[in-house]
Image (spheres, rainbow, N blue to C red):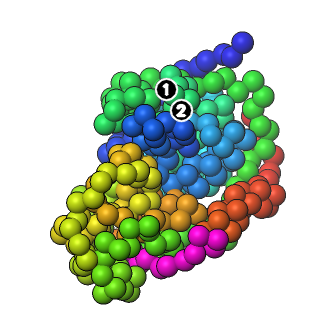
Amino acid sequence: MTTLMKLFRVVKPGFFTTVQDLGRQGFLRFGVPVSGAMDDFSLQLANMLVKNDSNDAGLEITMLGPELEVLDDAQIAVTGNISLRINGRDSEVWRTLTVKGGDAISFGKVRTGCRAYLAVRGGINVPAVLGSRSTYVRGEIGGIEGRQLRIGDCIEGFDAVHPIDYCLSLPMDRIPDFSAEIDVDVVLGSQLESFTEEGIKAFLSNPYVITVEADRMGYRLEGALIEHSERVDTISDAILPGSVQVPASGKPIVTMRDAQTTGGYPKIAAVVSADLHVLGQAKPGDKVCFHETTLSEAHRRLLEYKKLFRLIEANFHRRFLTI
């Protein structure tokens, strides 16, 4: 029988902190978004650092982190470029840490990128909805009653019967560089007839700036206008995270993890799966450049992305801890 334990009490919730795993798969046809971690790479690495399954739920921290009171001994890992303090002392990220009941964990602002992740040995426990513990705020499902953290929330976890007796840390050359200038590959869409050659060229040859209208649902971009060749409204069809839609304004919208499942704006392209986590770290003011690639190359890059985790795990730095 699985034992549960009270892990943390939320003293301050941070700007926008939610529980996320890798998302809900297989429910788009029912109108349920995928959700899940915006930067699944960083979440999976946090889980690897505490020897969890890659899909275990953790905390996604956006822009400004929370303050947490530790209620029971635990092992944690934090990934992202964010300041972390335990009992008022600076602590390292991208490594295994041990915390004790009564400890205080506090985060500052995200220095670069937009998000950081906290994983705890055994994983965070919230009710699974359609096979996922991810928070989808618009639908009020998953997470802690389908919302962001609030003051006084108690976060439960699964008791890790066998704590790890060593510290894992990520080699410096494997820590991601969260840049304010982002390059992503795209596969041009099946609705290219909706755009002129000049419009397609503008999309692929100009940087776009992420506007303040950016959240887990999608990013509105500012930059060179993309010219349509015909009427903009189309029959609604499927949308996935990474779809690039172009409304009548000619300004593109990139859909993200909480994207709606259908839409009527023509799609000019789709961001390749291997680059979605990079885009998931983008924030307002960052610049994005889109580069055309082929479907076969997108498949190859996805396979390489999946292999990367095994390579990283094989090269973890390891040293023994006193538990």
* Type of the residue with mark 1: Val
Question: Vertical placement of 182 versus 36: above or below?
Answer: below
On screen, residue 236 versus residue 32, left or right, reads left
For image coordinates 53% across by 70% down, the residue present is 177
- For this rendering, which residue is in front, 45 or 240? 240
Q: Residue 296 lies in magenta, yes or no?
A: yes
Real-space Cα separation, disc 2 to disc 1, in angstroms? 5 Å
Q: Is residue 56 visible?
A: yes
Disc assigned to residue 132: 2
Q: Is residue 85 visible?
A: no
Question: Vertical placement of 197 versus 251: above or below?
Answer: below
For image coordinates 64% across by 71% down, the residue present is 296
Question: Vertical placement of 319 versus 282: above or below?
Answer: above
Q: Position of residue 277 (x, y in %)?
A: 52, 59
Q: Position of residue 194 (x, y in %)?
A: 31, 72
CB-based contact (under 8 Å), mark 2 and mark 1 = yes
- For this rendering, which residue is in front, 285 or 22? 22
Disc assigned to residue 129: 1
Q: Position of residue 179 (x, y in %)?
A: 46, 72
Q: Secondary structure at mark 2?
A: loop
